[in-house]
Amino acid sequence: MSRLETLSRIAIIFVGFVAIVFALVQVESIFAPMALALVAGAVLSPVSDTWEKMGFSPVWGALTSLFMMLIAMGLLVMVFHPLVVQLVDQAPKVWSDVKEVVDGFRQSFRNLQDMGDQISEAVSSTAQSTQGGEEASVAMPNITDALLMAPAVLAQVLVFIGTLFFFLLTRNDIYSWAAAHLAESSERAGTARRLHLAERKVSSYFLTITVINAGLGLATGIVMQVLGMPGAILWGLVAFLINFILYLGPACLVVSLIFAGVGTFDGIWALLPAACYAALNATEGQFVTPALVGKHMRLNPLLVFMSLIFGIWLWGPVGGIVAIPILLWILVLADALPQTGNMKQMLAASNEN
């Protein structure tokens, strides 16, 4: 009977987890910007704390942090816009160069003595299907499509702004309420302190990652300038920004650099920009990030990888951005993160209180 009860509980937990995941997928347009706003609020919380320590009201701290985030979002749009325009302008040359490469390979296959007819038919059918797919993929959205998408995008932006502002404004009250309702009376102070500690960990993680990504962006910009890539500074900025989305971001940038390299250089040199960036990113991922993030956060690589895959599958790029901060939050609250000296001192002080 006890074994049956155990299996029943496991089944209920599993079904509940599947139901929650299904619900999160269905309400992505609401919960994704809310989760991103909560992470942004944790990152910007030191700004609000600084303003409050200077004697200003929480409203001013929340407004200042919100204003900083809106500026960052505006700069993000300004950075990506000219790069996208540049890639679109280079699309005809890229298509012509790619077509020449494909034709060269096709001619090589035709020179084979054995199975010549079979290879020719396969290449011909593949080329026809590829052309149809590429023509559909390069079709740019028109003004009507943009107008139809605008309300949905604006709604998500408003959800993000509202969640970020009110979280920054009332986060101390939220932590106090959570500690009062989720912990025993003797452990409320420690729970509240742990919530603030989780917030600091998320902020520290983003600060460390920002410094690392800035170094990667600077190195990428210098390398692109040496190679003679147009818009080298923009490529460096994009490398800095897109590296916040682990795995998926660098992969997209490698593809974009291949696209731009074909449009700028000829022959095998067209792959050099993507190869150089891949080498820089591999160096950052294998040596720099483990040395800095691993030293301060001590996250299990398997948990990091699984959380990233789950976040990207759940909410796409937004899920990739919020996956690690949410993982940090959960591990600190569950007391599952290896404790450093500073963490032990903070928790000891909270228990004494």
Image (cartoon, rainbow, N blue to C red):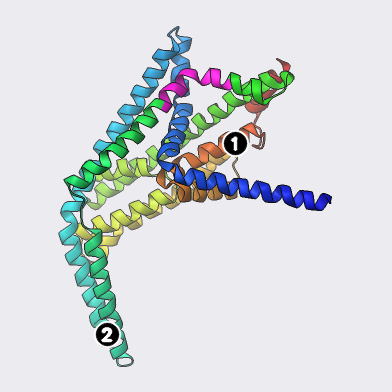
- The stretch of residues the image draws in magenta is 163-175
**Residue 212 figure quarter:** top left
Which residue is under mark 2?
120
Left or right of residue 285, residue 4 in this image = right
Q: Is residue 17 above or below residue 64?
A: below
Q: Nearer the viewer, residue 219 or 183?
A: 183
Residue 329 location, x and y as percent? 57, 34
**Residue at the spot x=51%, y=21% of the render?**
171
Q: Is residue 132 above or below residue 309?
A: below
Numbered circle sitting on residue 100? none
Q: Nearer the viewer, residue 44 or 160?
A: 160
**Residue at the spot x=19%, y=64% of the render?**
95
Q: Is residue 214 above or below residue 317?
A: above
Residue 295 location, x and y as percent? 57, 38
Q: Quadrant of the C terminus?
A: top right
Which residue is under mark 1?
330
**Residue 236 figure quarter:** top left
Tell me if I can see residue 155 in this picture.
yes
Type of amino acid under label 2: Ser
Name the main secondary structure of what is drawn in magenta: helix
Q: Is residue 112 a member of the stretch shown in magenta? A: no
Residue 280 location, x and y as percent? 39, 50
Type of amino acid under label 1: Ile
Q: Nearer the viewer, residue 219 or 142?
A: 142
User: Sequence-wise, which precedes: disc 1 or disc 2?
Assistant: 2
**Residue 216 figure quarter:** top left
Q: Residue furthest top?
A: 55
